[in-house]
Image: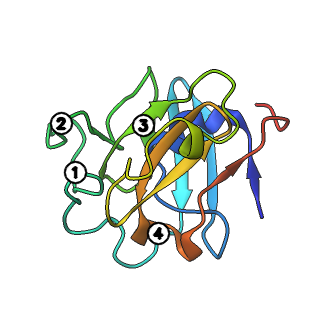
C-alpha cells in the first residue's frame, strides 16, 4: 500500500482513484497547482451522478455541480488540480477528535448509492464514485511524509 504526504490534501478532495489495487498516483505541486497522474479505471468518471450528484460529469468552470457539490477540476482553497477526472463530489470536515471521519463525522448514507466515503487523515470525509476506486480502496495519506 502506497502512502502519500498531506500536501495532497486538495488532491484527496478531488481524487478519483486509489493507489491500492493497481491504481497509481504521482504528482507535484507548484504555485497552487497540483499536477497529478492517475491510472483511471474504465468507466471513471461515470456517465451520470447518483441522486446526490456524486460522480456527475463536469468541466472546469462549467457550473454543472449543484446542491453543494463541487467539480474536482475547479480551483479549491487556492489550489488547482491538473490531471484528475472531472466529476462532482462533496466533502465534510471532521468533528474535533475524529479518528475516521467517514465513520464518526458523516451519516452512513453520506455519499449515496454508487459512491464511497473516503477519509483524508482525520481531517475530512469526501465522496468518490465507487467505479473510480480499484478494489474499492481509497487513497491512504501519510501525515509523517511531509512536503
Q: Are marks 4 and 2 in contact (CB under 8 Å)?
A: no
How many residues crowd around disc 4 within 10 Å: few (fewer than 14), some, or many (20 or more)? many
Q: Are marks 1 and 2 in contact (CB under 8 Å)?
A: yes
Q: Quadrant of the N terminus?
A: bottom right
Q: Quadrant of the C terminus?
A: top right
Tell me which numbered mark, 2 or 3, is placed earlier along the sequence. 2
The x, y position of residue 86, in whole percent, is 31, 52
Q: Which mark is residue 40?
A: 4
The x, y position of residue 70, in whole percent, is 29, 37
Quick check: 60 left or right of 41?
A: left
- Cα distance between the residues tagged 4 and 1: 20 Å
The residue labelled by disc 3 is 91
The residue labelled by disc 1 is 53
Tell us which disc is closer to us: 3 or 4.
3
* Element type at mark 1: loop
The x, y position of residue 73, in whole percent, is 34, 43
Tell us which disc is closer to us: 4 or 1.
1
* Element type at mark 2: loop
Question: Residue at 42% of width from left, 50% of height from top?
Answer: 127
Amino acid at each position: 500500500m502506497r502512502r502519500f504526504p498531506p500536501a495532497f490534501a486538495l488532491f484527496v478532495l478531488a481524487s478519483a482513484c486509489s493507489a491500492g489495487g493497481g491504481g497509481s498516483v504521482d504528482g507535484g505541486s507548484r504555485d497552487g497547482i497540483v499536477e497529478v497522474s492517475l491510472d483511471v479505471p474504465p468507466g471513471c468518471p461515470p456517465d451520470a451522478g447518483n441522486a446526490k450528484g456524486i460522480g456527475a460529469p463536469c468541466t472546469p468552470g462549467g457550473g454543472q455541480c449543484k446542491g453543494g457539490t463541487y467539480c474536482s477540476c475547479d480551483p479549491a482553497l487556492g489550489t488547482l488540480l491538473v490531471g484528475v477526472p472531472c466529476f462532482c463530489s462533496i466533502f465534510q470536515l471532521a468533528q474535533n477528535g475524529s479518528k475516521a471521519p467517514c465513520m464518526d463525522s458523516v451519516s452512513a448514507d453520506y455519499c449515496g448509492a454508487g459512491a464511497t466515503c473516503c477519509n483524508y487523515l482525520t481531517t475530512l470525509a469526501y465522496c468518490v464514485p465507487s467505479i473510480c476506486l480499484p478494489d474499492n480502496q481509497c487513497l491512504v495519506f501519510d501525515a509523517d511524509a511531509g512536503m
